[in-house]
Amino acid sequence: MTMSTQREVDEAEIRRLIGKIVEGLQDKDLEGLRRLYATDIVSFDIEPPLQHVGVEAKLKNWAPVFAFFEQVRYEVRDLTLTVGDDLAFGHAFARLSGTLKNGTATSGMWVRVTYCLRKIEGTWLIAHDQVSVPLDIASGKGVVDLQP
């Protein structure tokens, strides 16, 4: 396989992996999500604390989503990837929305996501992710009403 062809194969595999995040959230499938992350993932997610270390901590951060939402919708937009032999990174916009357990529909908010991936024993896994919203410096609050 030529280098460019291998890169294309790897990029397609990573795009499928990100798609499986969407599926796992919409299906409320924590075990399916577990298979997408390296066991030693370090996640800088939107919720405290400053970092979540290890796959159990990452999954623990997703669990409240399933507790609050009756129906989960997750979108990833404008995913851009840079792929090497066994390391890759990418960035995108993502939005979590859906119907809460009390029946209220929410359109959620768009966030910025950065993914860092490692190819471990032939399988691409997310080794680091960071989710953020822009900061309004004057108020000290996150800006959550922006659209990509």
Image (cartoon, helix red, strand yellow):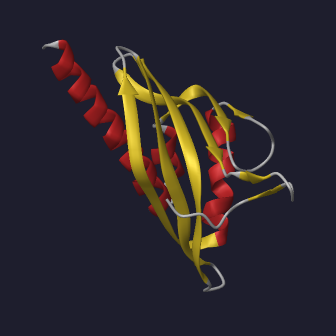
Would you say residue 122 is visible in this rendering?
yes
Name the residue furthest bottom. 103
- Decide which of 118, 135 is in the foreground and name it: 135
Residue beneath the point at 69% across and 51% down: 134
Q: Position of residue 129 (x, y in %)?
A: 58, 36
Residue beneath the point at 60% across and 71% down: 69
Q: Is residue 110 above or below residue 5?
A: below
Q: Position of residue 27 (x, y in %)?
A: 45, 61
Q: Is residue 80 above or below residue 54?
A: below
Q: Quadrant of residue 54?
A: top right
Q: Is residue 41 left or right of residue 76?
A: right
Q: Position of residue 14 (x, y in %)?
A: 35, 35
Question: Looking at the figure, which quarter contains the N terminus?
Answer: top left
Q: Quadrant of residue 56?
A: top right
Would you say residue 20 is visible in this rendering?
no
- Decide which of 29, 26 is in the foreground and name it: 26
- Decide which of 32, 145 is in the foreground and name it: 145
Name the residue furthest left. 1
Q: Position of residue 82 (x, y in %)?
A: 38, 27
Name the residue furthest right. 139
